[in-house]
Image (cartoon, grey):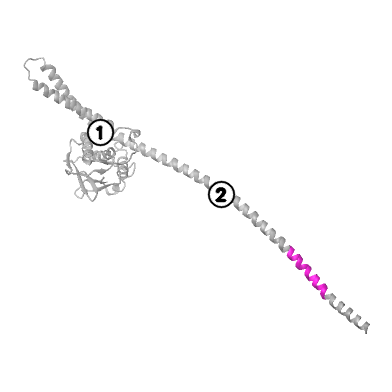
Amino acid sequence: MLRQKQRAVGYMALSNLPFWGLEVLAAQPRVAWDTLASRGTVAVWGLLILASGLAAVQASYLYARMKKSRAEAEAHRRMAQEALVATQTRAEESERLAQVGRLAAGVAHEVNNPLAFIQANLRFLQEELPRQGRSVEDCLEALAETQQGVARIQQIVQDLTMLARGAGEDAPREVGSCPLPTVIEESMRLASVRLKRLVVEVEVPSEVPLVRADARRLGQVLLNLLLNAADALEEARVASPRVAVRVRAEAQRVRVVLEDNGPGFPPEHLERLFTPFFTTKARGKGTGLGLAVSRRYVEGFGGALRAENRAEGGARFTVELLQA
C-alpha cells in the first residue's frame, strides 16, 4: 500500500513537470519582451528629445534669419523713403525755379516801367528845383511817384526771392489756416507780369472763411494755374484772352475755380495732366512737374485739385479746400 502511494506521488510529480517547464519557458520570452519594450521606449523618448532639440535649433536659426531679413527690409524701406523725399524735394525746387524763369521776361518789363518814370522824375527835380518860384506841390508829387516806383520794384524783388527760396527754407510744417483772399491777391500780383494782356475777372465774396492750407504753398499752386492759363492763351493766340477766378464757400468747403477761354485739353491728355513729367508744352517751356506738385500740395491740405474742359470751350481747374 505504501509503495502504491509513493508511486502515485511520483507519477503526479512527473506529470506536473512538463507543465511547469512550459510555464518557465513561456515566462522567459515575456521577461525579454518587457525588457526590450522598456529599452525601446527609452530609445523613442531619446529620439523625440533629440528631434525636439534639433527643431528648436533650426527654429532659432530661422528666427534669427527672419529677424535679420526684416531688419534689412526695414533699412531698405527707410532708404527708399529718404530717396523718395529727396526726389520730391528736388522736383518741387525745380518747379519753383521754373516758375521764376517763366516770370523773368515779364519781370524785366515790369521793373523797367517804374525805372523809366523814376528816371524822368529825378530829371524833372534836377531841372526844376534850382528855378525860383517853382511850386512845391509839383516837386512833392514827383517825389511821391518816385517812391511808388521804388516800392513796386522792391515788391517784385521780394516776391521773386520768396518764390525762388530753396527746399531747405521751405521745409514741411504743420498745416494751419490762412486767409484765401490774401493768398489770391498775392498770387495775382506775382502773375500780373504775365496777365497784362489778358482780361482777368476775380470774384471773391466779401466774407470767405479761413481755409486749411499753408499760405505759401497754396499761393504757389494758384500762381502755377494762372501761369498755365497765360501760356495756353498765348500759344493758342486767342483773340480776346480771358481768365476768371471765382471763389465759392459751401458745406464746410471752399472752392477756387480758375477758368480760361483757351483751347482746353485733348481728351487723351486729361487723365495724364497730373502725371509727373507729363507736359503739353513745347520742349524747354515746361518741366511737367507743376500740376503734379500742385496736386500733392492740395491733397496734403486735405483738399483736392481737379481739371476739366468747359462746355463752352477752355479749361477749368477747381481747387477744393477744407474750411479751417
**At x 13% / y 19%, what residue is drawn?**
125
**At x 23% / y 41%, what residue is drawn?**
180
Q: Secondary structure at mark 1?
A: helix
Quadrant (top left/top right/bottom left/bottom right) for the N terminus: bottom right
- Which residue is situated farthest in the left direction here? 133
Q: Are there few (<14), some (14-19), or many (20+) residues within 10 Å of tag 2?
A: few
User: How far across and down, in percent of the image, does residue 30 sit?
Assistant: 75, 68
Q: Check disc 1 and report the residue beneath it.
A: 103
Does residue 8 appear anywhere in the picture?
yes
Give the prevailing secondary structure in the magenta stretch.
Answer: helix
Q: Quadrant of residue 14?
A: bottom right
- What amino acid is found at the position of numbered circle 2 in the picture? Leu
In the figure, is residue 192 to the left or right of 72? left
- What amino acid is found at the position of numbered circle 1 in the picture? Leu
Q: What stretch of residues is rendered in magenta?
A: 19-35
**Is residue 255 a member of the stretch shown in magenta?**
no
Which label's residue is closer to the chain start, 2 or 1?
Answer: 2
Does residue 234 appear anywhere in the picture?
no
Q: CA distance from mark 2 to mark 1?
A: 61 Å
Q: Check disc 2 and report the residue beneath it.
A: 62
Q: As rendered, which of 98 and 93 lies closer to the eye?
A: 93
